[in-house]
Image (spheres, helix red, strand yellow):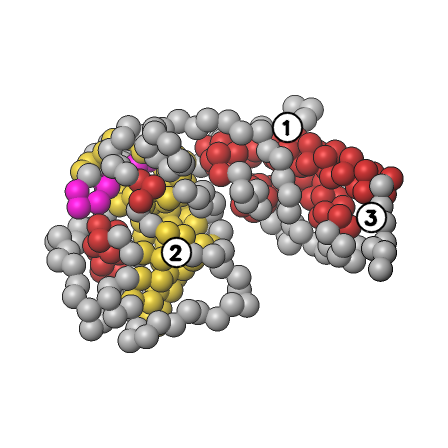
Amino acid sequence: MVLLPQILPSPRLAAAAASPNSAFRPAPRLHSSAPARRGRGARLATAASASGSGSGSSPSSPEPYQPAESDDGLVELPLFPLPLVLFPDATHALHIFEFRYRIMMHTVLQTDLRFGVVFAGSGAGGAADVGCVGEVVKHERLADDRFFLICKGQERFRVARVVRTKPYLVAAVQWLEDRPPAETPAPGDDAEALATDVEALMRDVIRIANRLNGKPEKDVGDLRRGLFPTPFSFYVGNTFEGAPREQQALLELEDTAARLRRERDTLRNTLNYLTAASAVKDAFPSSPSSG
């Protein structure tokens, strides 16, 4: 899907995460039909199992800590700065190869399988202070102690303070939830109506994008899949691939209606662009090659 979102800066965590962009190399986006990748000398493990033993050397891991809630309601969470945005219920496949994050994975797999994903774009500024918990649902430990893993987004959080930076970043975080809607929403604030509008726009964008790409125009099907407005807004935000700063802005919003309005505006802009491109293509069709 081609999208033209408005790019906005997001708040940044102080440069506690040194060189966040060198932290990892992301694997291709996970598709449910893709078989799990298997490496030589590796074994596939489910998230419920302990970390597998490989023939390569294993980094010395610090004593695993058990995430505990402090008196101020904050929870300690290991953080993984990545050039992507994880949304609740979304899945990502990752390749963990840098030493400090291999240490982190050993700790995560020995505790509660959860770590925080925070967006860290190119350039200075560190990582965003709002992220999403990723829970390891499947992992594969290779012989050289690298990991392939699949994580699924859980709840969102905001970083309150940095606890430590070595051997990897750990922060105290507070959980984020969208504010409950008013019993009688104001005009334009009805999340259910906004979700219906967003789904209709997504259908139109997909239809015209398929036409421009020479694909058959077929019924898109049920995009919402019975989701309530809040999880549907996260699903839509996850489709805005290639625009991580816009995705980060959507993740940080604490109002479902505001998130859906922003997604509606983005989809309208995209639809206008694709409609114009389709009109140009129809007006100036490619001439058949002569031979």
- Please state the horizontal and vertical placement of residue 276, each as a whole percent of the image: 78, 35
From the viewer's perspective, is residue 6 above or below residue 147?
above
Give the crowd class for mark 2: few <14, some 14-19, many >=20 residues within 10 Å. Answer: some
For the image shown, how many numbered marks are present on the structure?
3
Amino acid type at image mark 1: Asp
Is 170 contained in the magenta span?
A: yes
Q: Which residue is mark 3?
A: 286
2 or 3: tag closer to the N-terminus: 2
Highlighted magenta segment, given as a residue range: 166-174
- Please state the horizontal and vertical placement of residue 184, each as a whole percent of the image: 64, 27
Q: Residue at x 60, y 49 (%)?
A: 227
1 or 2: tag closer to the N-terminus: 2
Place residue 50 in its image quadrant: bottom left
Can residue 158 be seen?
no
- Please state the horizontal and vertical placement of residue 70, each as a whole percent of the image: 21, 37
Hey, which residue is sitting farthest top in the picture?
Answer: 186
Q: Residue at x 53, y 38 (%)?
A: 243
From the viewer's perspective, is residue 63 above or below residue 51?
above
Q: Which residue is mark 2?
A: 94
Q: Which residue is mark 1?
A: 189
Can residue 121 be seen?
yes
Foreground residue, 209 or 165?
A: 209
Give the crowd class for mark 1: few <14, some 14-19, many >=20 residues within 10 Å. Answer: some
- What is the C-alpha distance between the residues marked 1 and 2? 37 Å
